[in-house]
Image: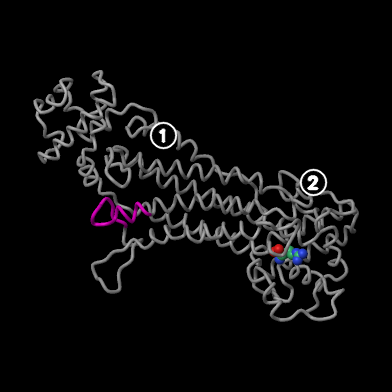
Amino acid sequence: MKKPWSGRFKKNTAKVAEQYTQSISYDIRLYKHDIAGSIAHAKMLAREKIISPKDSTLIIKGLKEIQKEIENGKFKFSHELEDIHMNIESALISKIGESGAKLHTARSRNDQITLDMRLYLREELNEILKLLRNLQSVIMTIVEKHIDSIMPGYTHTQRAQPVLLSHHLLAYISMFDRDYERFKESLKRINILPLGSCALAGTSLPINRHYVAELLGFEQVSINSMDSVSDRDFIIEFLSNSSILIMHLSRIAEELVLWSTSEFSFIEISDAFTTGSSIMPQKKNPDIAELIRAKTGRIYGNLIALLTIMKALPLTYNRDMQEDKEPLFDTVDTIKMTLSVMIDMLPEVKFNTKHMAENSEGGFSTATDTAEYLVKKGLPFRKAHEVIGKLVSYCISKDKSLSGLSIKEFKKFSTLFDNDIYDYIKANDSVKNRKSYGSASIEAVKKQISIFKQLLNSIPTQKNI
Ligand code: ARG
Protein backbone atom coordinates (compact mmCIF):
# COMPACT_ATOMS: atom_id res chain seq x y z
CA MET A 1 0.00 0.00 0.00
CA LYS A 2 1.38 3.40 -1.01
CA LYS A 3 2.13 5.67 1.91
CA PRO A 4 0.99 9.28 1.62
CA TRP A 5 4.55 10.41 2.46
CA SER A 6 6.37 7.98 0.13
CA GLY A 7 7.43 10.60 -2.48
CA ARG A 8 11.06 11.00 -1.38
CA PHE A 9 11.64 7.32 -0.47
CA LYS A 10 13.33 4.75 -2.72
CA LYS A 11 12.96 1.71 -0.49
CA ASN A 12 9.89 0.24 1.23
CA THR A 13 9.67 0.44 5.02
CA ALA A 14 10.91 -2.74 6.70
CA LYS A 15 8.03 -4.90 7.95
CA VAL A 16 9.41 -4.88 11.48
CA ALA A 17 9.69 -1.08 11.36
CA GLU A 18 6.08 -0.88 10.25
CA GLN A 19 4.99 -3.10 13.11
CA TYR A 20 7.03 -1.09 15.54
CA THR A 21 5.77 2.33 14.49
CA GLN A 22 2.11 1.61 13.81
CA SER A 23 -0.42 3.06 16.22
CA ILE A 24 -3.57 2.05 14.36
CA SER A 25 -4.07 -0.96 16.65
CA TYR A 26 -4.92 1.47 19.44
CA ASP A 27 -5.58 4.91 17.94
CA ILE A 28 -8.47 3.31 16.08
CA ARG A 29 -10.58 4.52 18.98
CA LEU A 30 -10.06 8.09 17.77
CA TYR A 31 -11.86 7.51 14.45
CA LYS A 32 -14.96 9.54 15.36
CA HIS A 33 -12.91 12.47 16.59
CA ASP A 34 -10.60 12.33 13.60
CA ILE A 35 -13.55 12.42 11.23
CA ALA A 36 -15.29 15.23 13.12
CA GLY A 37 -12.07 17.27 12.98
CA SER A 38 -11.70 16.60 9.25
CA ILE A 39 -15.29 17.58 8.51
CA ALA A 40 -14.85 20.89 10.34
CA HIS A 41 -11.55 21.44 8.54
CA ALA A 42 -13.14 20.76 5.12
CA LYS A 43 -15.99 23.16 5.88
CA MET A 44 -13.52 25.86 6.81
CA LEU A 45 -11.35 25.29 3.72
CA ALA A 46 -14.42 25.79 1.52
CA ARG A 47 -15.66 28.81 3.46
CA GLU A 48 -12.28 30.51 3.05
CA LYS A 49 -12.24 29.49 -0.66
CA ILE A 50 -9.13 27.36 -0.28
CA ILE A 51 -11.04 24.41 -1.78
CA SER A 52 -14.28 24.47 -3.77
CA PRO A 53 -17.70 23.88 -2.16
CA LYS A 54 -17.98 20.80 -4.38
CA ASP A 55 -14.73 19.34 -3.01
CA SER A 56 -15.86 20.05 0.51
CA THR A 57 -19.24 18.38 -0.03
CA LEU A 58 -17.57 15.30 -1.53
CA ILE A 59 -15.07 15.13 1.33
CA ILE A 60 -17.77 15.38 3.98
CA LYS A 61 -19.95 12.78 2.27
CA GLY A 62 -16.96 10.45 1.87
CA LEU A 63 -15.93 10.86 5.52
CA LYS A 64 -19.45 10.11 6.71
CA GLU A 65 -19.48 6.93 4.62
CA ILE A 66 -16.13 5.93 6.08
CA GLN A 67 -17.52 6.48 9.59
CA LYS A 68 -20.41 4.13 8.80
CA GLU A 69 -18.05 1.52 7.35
CA ILE A 70 -15.93 1.66 10.51
CA GLU A 71 -19.00 1.36 12.70
CA ASN A 72 -20.35 -1.60 10.67
CA GLY A 73 -17.00 -3.35 10.86
CA LYS A 74 -16.58 -3.11 7.07
CA PHE A 75 -13.56 -0.80 7.05
CA LYS A 76 -10.20 -2.44 6.30
CA PHE A 77 -7.53 -0.97 8.58
CA SER A 78 -3.96 -1.39 7.51
CA HIS A 79 -0.79 -1.33 9.64
CA GLU A 80 1.13 -0.09 6.61
CA LEU A 81 -0.84 3.13 6.88
CA GLU A 82 0.47 3.63 10.43
CA ASP A 83 -2.29 5.47 12.16
CA ILE A 84 -5.93 6.46 12.15
CA HIS A 85 -5.24 9.67 10.19
CA MET A 86 -3.59 8.00 7.24
CA ASN A 87 -6.01 5.08 7.20
CA ILE A 88 -8.96 7.42 6.89
CA GLU A 89 -7.31 9.82 4.46
CA SER A 90 -6.21 7.00 2.14
CA ALA A 91 -9.69 5.50 2.17
CA LEU A 92 -11.13 8.91 1.35
CA ILE A 93 -8.78 9.38 -1.60
CA SER A 94 -9.62 5.88 -2.93
CA LYS A 95 -13.28 6.75 -2.61
CA ILE A 96 -13.44 10.26 -4.11
CA GLY A 97 -10.06 10.74 -5.80
CA GLU A 98 -8.61 14.24 -6.35
CA SER A 99 -11.04 16.03 -3.99
CA GLY A 100 -9.96 13.73 -1.16
CA ALA A 101 -6.37 14.66 -1.80
CA LYS A 102 -7.24 18.26 -0.87
CA LEU A 103 -8.33 17.50 2.70
CA HIS A 104 -4.83 17.61 4.15
CA THR A 105 -4.32 21.21 2.95
CA ALA A 106 -3.06 23.48 5.75
CA ARG A 107 -2.97 20.64 8.22
CA SER A 108 -0.44 18.14 9.52
CA ARG A 109 -0.78 14.96 11.49
CA ASN A 110 0.97 16.85 14.27
CA ASP A 111 -1.92 19.23 14.87
CA GLN A 112 -4.43 16.57 13.84
CA ILE A 113 -3.43 14.07 16.52
CA THR A 114 -3.52 16.55 19.36
CA LEU A 115 -6.91 17.75 18.11
CA ASP A 116 -8.22 14.17 18.18
CA MET A 117 -6.84 13.61 21.66
CA ARG A 118 -8.46 16.80 22.94
CA LEU A 119 -11.83 15.89 21.46
CA TYR A 120 -11.55 12.38 22.86
CA LEU A 121 -10.51 13.46 26.34
CA ARG A 122 -13.17 16.17 26.51
CA GLU A 123 -15.83 13.58 25.79
CA GLU A 124 -14.47 11.01 28.24
CA LEU A 125 -14.05 13.61 30.92
CA ASN A 126 -17.75 14.36 30.78
CA GLU A 127 -18.44 10.69 31.38
CA ILE A 128 -16.03 10.62 34.29
CA LEU A 129 -17.61 13.73 35.82
CA LYS A 130 -21.03 12.09 35.66
CA LEU A 131 -19.70 8.89 37.22
CA LEU A 132 -18.07 10.86 40.02
CA ARG A 133 -21.33 12.63 40.85
CA ASN A 134 -23.08 9.29 40.68
CA LEU A 135 -20.62 7.78 43.16
CA GLN A 136 -21.11 10.70 45.53
CA SER A 137 -24.89 10.23 45.37
CA VAL A 138 -24.56 6.53 46.14
CA ILE A 139 -22.46 7.37 49.21
CA MET A 140 -24.94 10.10 50.18
CA THR A 141 -27.75 7.53 50.31
CA ILE A 142 -25.74 5.48 52.81
CA VAL A 143 -24.88 8.64 54.78
CA GLU A 144 -28.54 9.56 55.15
CA LYS A 145 -29.49 6.04 56.14
CA HIS A 146 -26.84 5.97 58.86
CA ILE A 147 -26.89 9.59 59.87
CA ASP A 148 -26.74 8.84 63.63
CA SER A 149 -24.80 5.56 63.70
CA ILE A 150 -21.83 5.84 66.00
CA MET A 151 -18.53 4.18 65.18
CA PRO A 152 -14.93 4.42 66.36
CA GLY A 153 -12.79 7.00 64.56
CA TYR A 154 -9.13 6.08 64.10
CA THR A 155 -5.73 7.68 63.95
CA HIS A 156 -2.70 5.43 63.41
CA THR A 157 -5.32 2.67 62.92
CA GLN A 158 -5.81 2.87 66.69
CA ARG A 159 -9.15 3.80 68.18
CA ALA A 160 -9.14 7.56 68.70
CA GLN A 161 -12.54 9.18 69.23
CA PRO A 162 -16.13 8.18 68.55
CA VAL A 163 -17.43 9.52 65.25
CA LEU A 164 -20.48 8.99 63.08
CA LEU A 165 -20.54 6.56 60.17
CA SER A 166 -22.24 9.34 58.19
CA HIS A 167 -19.37 11.71 58.99
CA HIS A 168 -16.78 9.11 58.01
CA LEU A 169 -18.46 8.54 54.65
CA LEU A 170 -18.94 12.26 54.06
CA ALA A 171 -15.15 12.52 54.18
CA TYR A 172 -15.14 10.50 50.95
CA ILE A 173 -17.84 12.67 49.42
CA SER A 174 -15.50 15.63 50.12
CA MET A 175 -12.53 13.90 48.49
CA PHE A 176 -14.54 13.01 45.41
CA ASP A 177 -15.76 16.56 45.26
CA ARG A 178 -12.23 17.88 45.00
CA ASP A 179 -11.56 15.25 42.33
CA TYR A 180 -14.62 16.46 40.47
CA GLU A 181 -13.46 20.06 40.70
CA ARG A 182 -9.96 19.20 39.50
CA PHE A 183 -11.28 17.35 36.43
CA LYS A 184 -13.79 20.07 35.67
CA GLU A 185 -11.21 22.80 36.03
CA SER A 186 -8.86 20.94 33.67
CA LEU A 187 -11.49 21.07 30.92
CA LYS A 188 -10.56 24.66 30.20
CA ARG A 189 -7.03 23.58 29.33
CA ILE A 190 -8.28 20.68 27.21
CA ASN A 191 -10.92 22.62 25.36
CA ILE A 192 -8.49 24.55 23.16
CA LEU A 193 -8.25 24.12 19.38
CA PRO A 194 -4.75 23.17 18.16
CA LEU A 195 -5.73 22.58 14.51
CA GLY A 196 -4.24 25.05 12.07
CA SER A 197 -0.88 24.98 13.86
CA CYS A 198 0.03 22.58 11.04
CA ALA A 199 3.40 20.82 11.35
CA LEU A 200 4.76 23.40 13.78
CA ALA A 201 4.77 26.84 12.21
CA GLY A 202 1.30 27.53 10.88
CA THR A 203 0.58 28.08 7.18
CA SER A 204 0.69 30.67 4.40
CA LEU A 205 -2.86 29.71 3.40
CA PRO A 206 -5.68 31.96 4.65
CA ILE A 207 -7.28 29.51 7.10
CA ASN A 208 -9.81 30.50 9.73
CA ARG A 209 -9.00 28.73 12.96
CA HIS A 210 -11.68 30.53 14.98
CA TYR A 211 -14.36 29.18 12.67
CA VAL A 212 -13.08 25.61 13.18
CA ALA A 213 -13.07 26.19 16.94
CA GLU A 214 -16.68 27.33 16.77
CA LEU A 215 -17.70 24.27 14.72
CA LEU A 216 -16.06 21.89 17.17
CA GLY A 217 -17.22 23.66 20.32
CA PHE A 218 -13.77 24.77 21.49
CA GLU A 219 -13.68 27.72 23.84
CA GLN A 220 -10.29 28.93 22.72
CA VAL A 221 -7.81 28.74 19.85
CA SER A 222 -4.22 27.91 20.80
CA ILE A 223 -2.00 30.97 20.59
CA ASN A 224 1.36 29.43 19.75
CA SER A 225 1.66 26.85 16.98
CA MET A 226 4.88 25.32 18.34
CA ASP A 227 3.39 24.88 21.79
CA SER A 228 0.20 23.45 20.27
CA VAL A 229 1.86 20.54 18.52
CA SER A 230 4.23 19.74 21.40
CA ASP A 231 1.91 20.13 24.35
CA ARG A 232 0.85 17.01 26.16
CA ASP A 233 0.33 18.76 29.54
CA PHE A 234 -3.40 18.34 29.18
CA ILE A 235 -2.94 14.56 29.16
CA ILE A 236 -0.42 14.61 31.99
CA GLU A 237 -2.83 16.73 34.01
CA PHE A 238 -5.58 14.21 33.40
CA LEU A 239 -3.29 11.34 34.46
CA SER A 240 -2.30 13.29 37.53
CA ASN A 241 -5.90 14.04 38.49
CA SER A 242 -6.72 10.38 37.86
CA SER A 243 -3.87 9.36 40.16
CA ILE A 244 -5.33 11.42 42.98
CA LEU A 245 -8.79 10.01 42.31
CA ILE A 246 -7.61 6.39 42.26
CA MET A 247 -5.67 7.05 45.48
CA HIS A 248 -8.96 8.15 47.09
CA LEU A 249 -10.72 5.11 45.67
CA SER A 250 -7.98 2.88 47.05
CA ARG A 251 -8.52 4.29 50.52
CA ILE A 252 -12.21 3.54 50.58
CA ALA A 253 -11.45 0.12 49.05
CA GLU A 254 -8.92 -0.54 51.80
CA GLU A 255 -11.48 0.34 54.47
CA LEU A 256 -13.91 -2.11 52.89
CA VAL A 257 -11.23 -4.80 53.02
CA LEU A 258 -10.32 -3.99 56.62
CA TRP A 259 -13.87 -3.58 57.87
CA SER A 260 -14.97 -6.89 56.35
CA THR A 261 -12.34 -8.89 58.29
CA SER A 262 -13.66 -11.01 61.15
CA GLU A 263 -11.39 -8.91 63.38
CA PHE A 264 -13.34 -5.73 62.54
CA SER A 265 -16.69 -7.19 61.43
CA PHE A 266 -18.00 -3.71 60.69
CA ILE A 267 -19.44 -4.64 57.31
CA GLU A 268 -20.48 -7.49 55.12
CA ILE A 269 -20.03 -7.15 51.37
CA SER A 270 -22.72 -8.97 49.42
CA ASP A 271 -21.96 -12.24 47.61
CA ALA A 272 -22.32 -10.35 44.34
CA PHE A 273 -19.13 -8.42 45.08
CA THR A 274 -16.98 -11.04 46.79
CA THR A 275 -15.37 -14.26 45.61
CA GLY A 276 -14.62 -17.64 47.13
CA SER A 277 -11.41 -19.56 47.65
CA SER A 278 -10.62 -22.62 45.55
CA ILE A 279 -9.29 -24.46 48.59
CA MET A 280 -10.89 -22.98 51.73
CA PRO A 281 -14.64 -23.50 51.50
CA GLN A 282 -15.48 -21.03 54.27
CA LYS A 283 -13.78 -18.05 52.60
CA LYS A 284 -15.52 -15.01 51.25
CA ASN A 285 -12.93 -12.65 49.90
CA PRO A 286 -13.21 -8.92 49.09
CA ASP A 287 -11.38 -9.33 45.76
CA ILE A 288 -13.25 -6.52 44.05
CA ALA A 289 -12.21 -4.01 46.71
CA GLU A 290 -8.67 -5.41 46.59
CA LEU A 291 -8.48 -4.92 42.83
CA ILE A 292 -9.73 -1.36 43.16
CA ARG A 293 -6.93 -0.82 45.68
CA ALA A 294 -4.45 -2.34 43.23
CA LYS A 295 -5.48 -0.24 40.23
CA THR A 296 -3.45 2.63 41.69
CA GLY A 297 -0.38 0.78 40.38
CA ARG A 298 -1.28 1.11 36.74
CA ILE A 299 -2.64 4.63 36.99
CA TYR A 300 0.46 5.97 38.77
CA GLY A 301 2.51 3.98 36.25
CA ASN A 302 0.72 5.67 33.36
CA LEU A 303 1.42 9.10 34.84
CA ILE A 304 5.11 8.34 35.35
CA ALA A 305 5.31 6.84 31.84
CA LEU A 306 4.09 10.00 30.15
CA LEU A 307 6.09 12.34 32.37
CA THR A 308 9.16 10.32 31.42
CA ILE A 309 8.32 10.28 27.71
CA MET A 310 7.93 14.05 27.67
CA LYS A 311 10.94 14.86 29.80
CA ALA A 312 13.62 16.80 27.88
CA LEU A 313 11.94 16.38 24.49
CA PRO A 314 13.09 19.23 22.28
CA LEU A 315 10.40 21.25 20.54
CA THR A 316 8.29 20.51 18.65
CA TYR A 317 6.60 17.23 17.69
CA ASN A 318 8.62 14.05 18.19
CA ARG A 319 7.40 10.57 17.46
CA ASP A 320 7.99 9.74 21.13
CA MET A 321 4.70 11.50 21.72
CA GLN A 322 2.77 8.71 20.03
CA GLU A 323 3.43 6.78 23.24
CA ASP A 324 0.96 9.06 25.06
CA LYS A 325 -2.00 7.07 23.81
CA GLU A 326 -1.91 3.76 25.60
CA PRO A 327 -1.34 5.30 29.06
CA LEU A 328 -4.22 7.70 28.42
CA PHE A 329 -6.62 5.10 27.06
CA ASP A 330 -5.78 2.65 29.81
CA THR A 331 -6.34 5.34 32.44
CA VAL A 332 -9.70 6.37 30.98
CA ASP A 333 -10.86 2.73 30.85
CA THR A 334 -9.58 1.89 34.33
CA ILE A 335 -11.05 4.99 35.96
CA LYS A 336 -14.45 4.54 34.32
CA MET A 337 -14.59 0.85 35.20
CA THR A 338 -13.39 1.38 38.76
CA LEU A 339 -15.92 4.15 39.38
CA SER A 340 -18.71 1.98 37.95
CA VAL A 341 -17.74 -1.00 40.10
CA MET A 342 -17.61 1.15 43.23
CA ILE A 343 -21.01 2.67 42.36
CA ASP A 344 -22.53 -0.82 42.09
CA MET A 345 -20.72 -2.35 45.06
CA LEU A 346 -21.31 0.26 47.79
CA PRO A 347 -25.10 -0.20 47.98
CA GLU A 348 -24.36 -3.92 48.46
CA VAL A 349 -22.44 -3.32 51.67
CA LYS A 350 -24.26 -4.06 54.91
CA PHE A 351 -23.07 -2.07 57.93
CA ASN A 352 -23.13 -3.81 61.31
CA THR A 353 -23.98 -0.56 63.04
CA LYS A 354 -24.65 -2.17 66.41
CA HIS A 355 -21.20 -3.74 66.47
CA MET A 356 -19.61 -0.49 65.30
CA ALA A 357 -21.34 1.44 68.10
CA GLU A 358 -20.26 -1.10 70.71
CA ASN A 359 -16.70 -0.82 69.52
CA SER A 360 -16.70 2.93 69.84
CA GLU A 361 -17.02 2.64 73.63
CA GLY A 362 -13.77 0.82 74.35
CA GLY A 363 -10.20 2.07 74.26
CA PHE A 364 -10.87 5.22 76.35
CA SER A 365 -12.17 6.85 73.20
CA THR A 366 -13.82 9.64 75.23
CA ALA A 367 -10.62 10.62 77.06
CA THR A 368 -10.38 13.84 75.03
CA ASP A 369 -13.98 14.72 75.92
CA THR A 370 -13.15 14.13 79.55
CA ALA A 371 -10.18 16.49 79.27
CA GLU A 372 -12.43 19.06 77.58
CA TYR A 373 -14.84 18.66 80.53
CA LEU A 374 -12.06 19.85 82.83
CA VAL A 375 -11.24 22.71 80.44
CA LYS A 376 -14.86 23.83 80.68
CA LYS A 377 -14.40 23.84 84.48
CA GLY A 378 -11.42 26.17 84.11
CA LEU A 379 -8.36 23.89 83.95
CA PRO A 380 -5.74 24.72 81.26
CA PHE A 381 -5.84 22.04 78.55
CA ARG A 382 -2.27 20.79 79.07
CA LYS A 383 -3.03 20.22 82.76
CA ALA A 384 -6.33 18.54 81.95
CA HIS A 385 -4.50 16.29 79.45
CA GLU A 386 -2.13 15.17 82.20
CA VAL A 387 -4.94 14.53 84.71
CA ILE A 388 -6.79 12.34 82.22
CA GLY A 389 -3.56 10.57 81.24
CA LYS A 390 -3.13 9.57 84.87
CA LEU A 391 -6.79 8.62 85.12
CA VAL A 392 -6.48 6.33 82.09
CA SER A 393 -3.36 4.73 83.51
CA TYR A 394 -5.25 4.15 86.78
CA CYS A 395 -8.16 2.56 84.87
CA ILE A 396 -5.80 0.25 83.01
CA SER A 397 -4.18 -0.91 86.24
CA LYS A 398 -7.61 -1.55 87.80
CA ASP A 399 -9.04 -3.01 84.59
CA LYS A 400 -11.83 -0.44 84.59
CA SER A 401 -13.40 1.83 82.02
CA LEU A 402 -13.99 5.56 82.57
CA SER A 403 -17.70 5.02 83.07
CA GLY A 404 -16.93 2.31 85.63
CA LEU A 405 -15.24 4.80 87.96
CA SER A 406 -17.01 6.16 91.02
CA ILE A 407 -17.17 9.93 91.59
CA LYS A 408 -14.82 9.43 94.52
CA GLU A 409 -12.25 7.88 92.23
CA PHE A 410 -12.65 10.77 89.76
CA LYS A 411 -12.20 13.32 92.51
CA LYS A 412 -8.89 11.73 93.52
CA PHE A 413 -7.49 12.99 90.24
CA SER A 414 -9.15 16.42 90.22
CA THR A 415 -11.53 18.17 92.57
CA LEU A 416 -13.14 19.76 89.49
CA PHE A 417 -14.94 16.50 88.73
CA ASP A 418 -18.63 16.48 89.57
CA ASN A 419 -21.53 14.13 89.01
CA ASP A 420 -22.15 15.66 85.59
CA ILE A 421 -18.95 13.95 84.36
CA TYR A 422 -21.14 10.92 83.60
CA ASP A 423 -22.74 12.97 80.80
CA TYR A 424 -19.40 13.15 79.04
CA ILE A 425 -17.93 9.68 78.97
CA LYS A 426 -20.19 7.61 76.75
CA ALA A 427 -19.50 7.55 73.01
CA ASN A 428 -22.99 8.87 72.51
CA ASP A 429 -22.31 11.89 74.78
CA SER A 430 -19.10 12.61 72.96
CA VAL A 431 -20.93 12.90 69.63
CA LYS A 432 -23.79 14.87 71.21
CA ASN A 433 -21.49 17.39 72.93
CA ARG A 434 -19.50 18.35 69.85
CA LYS A 435 -20.02 21.92 68.79
CA SER A 436 -17.50 22.84 66.11
CA TYR A 437 -18.30 23.42 62.45
CA GLY A 438 -17.36 20.38 60.36
CA SER A 439 -17.22 18.06 63.38
CA ALA A 440 -18.52 14.54 63.89
CA SER A 441 -21.83 15.65 65.38
CA ILE A 442 -25.31 15.18 63.99
CA GLU A 443 -25.80 18.93 63.56
CA ALA A 444 -22.56 19.34 61.62
CA VAL A 445 -23.33 16.25 59.54
CA LYS A 446 -26.72 17.68 58.59
CA LYS A 447 -24.98 20.86 57.45
CA GLN A 448 -22.54 18.84 55.33
CA ILE A 449 -25.38 16.87 53.79
CA SER A 450 -27.14 20.03 52.71
CA ILE A 451 -23.94 21.55 51.26
CA PHE A 452 -23.03 18.45 49.27
CA LYS A 453 -26.56 17.75 48.10
CA GLN A 454 -26.59 21.12 46.40
CA LEU A 455 -23.28 20.41 44.69
CA LEU A 456 -24.46 16.98 43.57
CA ASN A 457 -27.17 18.58 41.48
CA SER A 458 -24.66 20.32 39.25
CA ILE A 459 -23.85 18.15 36.26
CA PRO A 460 -21.59 18.99 33.32
CA THR A 461 -23.10 20.56 30.22
CA GLN A 462 -20.09 20.53 27.88
CA LYS A 463 -21.15 19.60 24.36
CA ASN A 464 -19.48 16.63 22.73
CA ILE A 465 -18.88 16.12 19.06
N1 ARG B 1 0.43 8.56 15.12
C1 ARG B 1 1.09 9.79 15.40
C2 ARG B 1 1.04 10.09 16.89
O1 ARG B 1 0.25 9.53 17.54
C3 ARG B 1 0.45 10.90 14.66
C4 ARG B 1 1.35 12.04 14.36
C5 ARG B 1 2.41 11.61 13.41
N2 ARG B 1 3.21 12.68 12.99
C6 ARG B 1 4.39 12.48 12.37
N3 ARG B 1 5.02 13.53 12.03
N4 ARG B 1 4.87 11.29 12.17
O2 ARG B 1 1.77 10.88 17.42
Q: Which residues are magenta?
A: 254-269
- What amino acid is at disc 1? Gln
Q: Contact (CB < 8 A) between labels 2 and 1?
A: no
Quarter of the image where one finds residue 41: bottom right
Mark with earlier residue (2, 1): 2
SS type, badge 2 = helix
Which percent across, then down, holds residue 216?
A: 73, 51
The residue to which callout 2 is attached is: 210
Q: Is residue 266 above or below residue 408?
A: below
User: Is residue 171 left or right of 77 when viewed as pictured?
Assistant: left
Q: Residue at x 74, y 50 (%)?
A: 193
SS type, badge 1 = helix
Which percent across, then down, holds residue 340?
A: 46, 56
User: Is residue 101 left or right of 456 when viewed as pictured?
Assistant: right
Residue 210 falls within the magenta-colored stretch: no
The residue to which callout 1 is attached is: 448
Which percent across, then down, holds residue 319?
A: 72, 65
- For disc 2, the neighbor class at 10 Å (few under 14, some 14 to 19, many from 20) is some
